[in-house]
Image: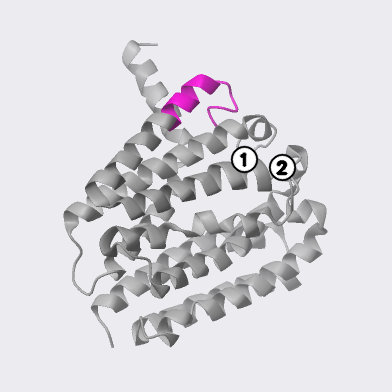
Amino acid sequence: MSTLTIEQNRIAQYWALTKPRVTQLAVFCAVIGMFLATPDLPDWKIVVAATVGIWLLAGAAFAVNCLVEREIDARMARTARRPMARGEISVVQTLVFSGVIGGMGMWVLYNLVNPLTMWLTFATFVGYAVIYTIILKPATPQNIVIGGLSGAMPPALGWAAIANDVPMQAWILVLIIFIWTPPHFWALAMYRRDDYARSGLPMLPVTHGLKFTQFHVWLYTIALVSTSMLPFAVRMSGVIYLVSAAVLGAVFLWHSWQIWRHYTDLIARKTFTWSIIYLSLLFAALLVDHYIPL
């Protein structure tokens, strides 16, 4: 194997530590928050700097997650190919990598955006990498509910980057993602329940069974659809968003109803996939409505 190929593989391994697909969705929601924070177009320099800084700190948090859960990941088919699980990257290398990109992210946010955004993003890092990953996840089947706040923070981070403030409207967006997280993650946990049983983590389908989890996915989806109407109720959005939220929510409700009443692993897998599409389209609808109000 050539030196170039080895270096490319090493870069790919470090890139995988940042869980890029998950990071992309989080940063997308942060960018939407940036655009919603101002009636005009935001300063593109701040948008770029905030996006880079938030991405770097999110990647650092996910690298710590991979480090802490390396033995758990090795027992699960879904995660066994991660670099830490395969022993391709050492503990020291991961810590250094996380520290470097996390430090870079904090520098970018503090110096090129504003201190509020840096501190909020750092608190999110601590919430995910320490409170959720180390304390909550192995301790309670409600881990994803309690720890979901850190994953729900991106819109507030983006809003703070532009406005240097986090008003009620930003927290409504955080609440939407917070309520979205349990049905999204439990759909995955249900069709991957054997994986989670091997992992030793107290995930809800393992500790309380499928029926209990199915019903809670249905309940949380009802709460999610109701919560998604709040932007229209407080007049931060208009008809375009209202119609979009209603249609997207109806599809999510149908998926969740299928999970509750006619469960199969295939239905759970489709629900998990739809949940990602749902959140992306919901926030995209907010952006469209922001600039084309009806």
Up the image or down, 190 lies above or below 33; here it is above
Foreground residue among 241 and 114: 114
Give the alpha-carbon distance from disc 1 to disc 2, as whole Å. 8 Å
Q: Quadrant of the N terminus?
A: top left
Of callouts 1 and 2, the N-terminal one: 1
Quick check: 78 left or right of 114?
A: right
Q: Vertically, is 207 above or below 9?
A: below
- Residue topped by disc 1: 78
Asked whether the viewer can see residue 226, the reply is yes
- Determine which quarter of the picture holds residue 253: bottom right
Q: Label 1 is placed on what type of residue?
A: Arg
Name the quadrant of the C terminus: bottom left
The residue labelled by disc 2 is 195
Q: In percent of the image, x 71 and y 57: which residue is there?
A: 142
Rendered location of residue 149, percent (x, y): 54, 59
Which amino acid type corresponds to the residue marked 2 in the rendered image? Asp
Q: Position of residue 98 (x, y in %)?
A: 44, 32
Q: Which residues are magenta?
A: 81-98
Any part of residue 262 in sight: no
User: Where's residue 276, x and y in %?
Assistant: 49, 60
